[in-house]
């Protein structure tokens, strides 16, 4: 009987190996449609879901998520992609100098936040902030990405999931009119939206 549980665990890893190395990360960086779409492009990402986190309100909705940020839950295979690589792509898809919103979306809901579950994730996030500061050649205190202990993730409404794929024209119009890529290009140059190694 004492071998039964380890056998079940080993068998489940064999049947569904993706879940064996699955890790989760919660990130806020403005509109969750955009962040979801941008992060899904990275090899090793199993899936990305849009939702709400960071506040105390129970069962938040798009119409009422006061205290929460629009976030994405990133489910990734730690054997294929590392947390620092994901954070590098995250930074290159946001404006880390803007702590009052992102691009045309203003207010608390759109502040950039990295939610960490333990000291290792917090350390990786701090290292990413330092690297972003160096690459952008700005003082560390100019990086306005908050680090916050991970709380409950609330899944957003179904119509928000995979919005970029399901509503391609509307998504592209929104993204362009919001000035997201224009600002990213100005800020990050050739490294915008990329996983290129950090430059000093």
Image: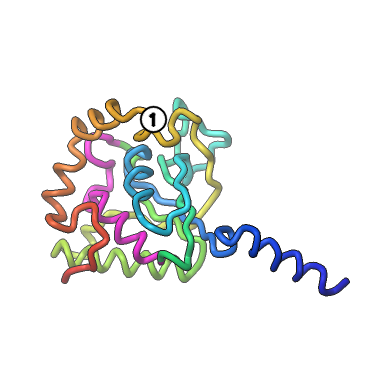
Q: Is residue 91 magenta?
A: yes
Label total for image? 1
Q: Quadrant of residue 137?
A: bottom left
Image coords of residue 181 (percent x, y): 18, 43
Residue at 47%, 39% in the rendered image: 51
What x and y, as percent, mark residue 85?
34, 64
Judge whether 98 appears above or below 106 on screen.
below
Work out which quarter of the rendered image holds the C terminus and state it. bottom left
Q: Residues within 10 Å of mark 1 (few under 14, many from 20)?
A: few
**Figure check: 85 above or below 180:** below
Residue 117 lies within the magenta run: no
Q: Nearer the viewer, residue 2 or 183?
A: 2
**Residue 10 horizontal/vertical position (percent):** 69, 68
Residue drawn at x 50%, y 30% is 158
Viewport quadrant of the N terminus: bottom right
Residue 53 in the figure: left or right of residue 59: left
**Is residue 153 or residue 56 the one in the foreground?**
153
Q: Which residue is mark 1?
A: 166
Identify whether 32 is placed above or below 131.
above
Q: Residue at x 26, y 49 (%)?
A: 94
In screen coordinates, is 54 left or right of 10? Answer: left
Numbered range of the magenta stretch = 82-106
Query: Could you say which is closer to the camera, residue 13 or residue 5?
Result: 13
Disc 1 secondary structure class: helix
């Amino acid at each position: 009987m004492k071998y039964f549980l380890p056998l079940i665990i080993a068998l489940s890893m064999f049947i569904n190996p993706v879940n064996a190395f699955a890790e989760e990360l919660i990130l806020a960086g403005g509109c969750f449609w955009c962040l979801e779409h941008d992060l899904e492009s990275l090899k090793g990402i199993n899936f990305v879901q849009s939702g709400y986190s960071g506040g105390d309100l129970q069962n938040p909705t798009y119409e009422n998520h006061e205290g929460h940020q629009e976030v994405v839950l990133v489910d990734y295979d730690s054997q294929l992609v590392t947390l620092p690589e994901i954070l590098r792509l995250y930074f290159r898809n946001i404006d880390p100098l803007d702590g009052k919103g992102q691009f045309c979306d203003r207010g608390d809901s759109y502040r950039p936040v990295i939610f960490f579950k333990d000291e290792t994730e917090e350390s990786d996030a701090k290292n990413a902030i330092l690297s972003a500061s160096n690459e952008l050649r700005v003082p560390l205190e100019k990086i306005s990405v908050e680090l916050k202990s991970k709380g409950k993730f609330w899944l957003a409404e179904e119509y928000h999931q995979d919005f970029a794929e399901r509503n391609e024209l509307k998504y592209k119009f929104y993204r362009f009119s919001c000035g997201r890529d224009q600002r990213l290009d100005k800020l990050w140059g050739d490294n915008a939206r990329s996983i290129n190694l950090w430059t000093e």
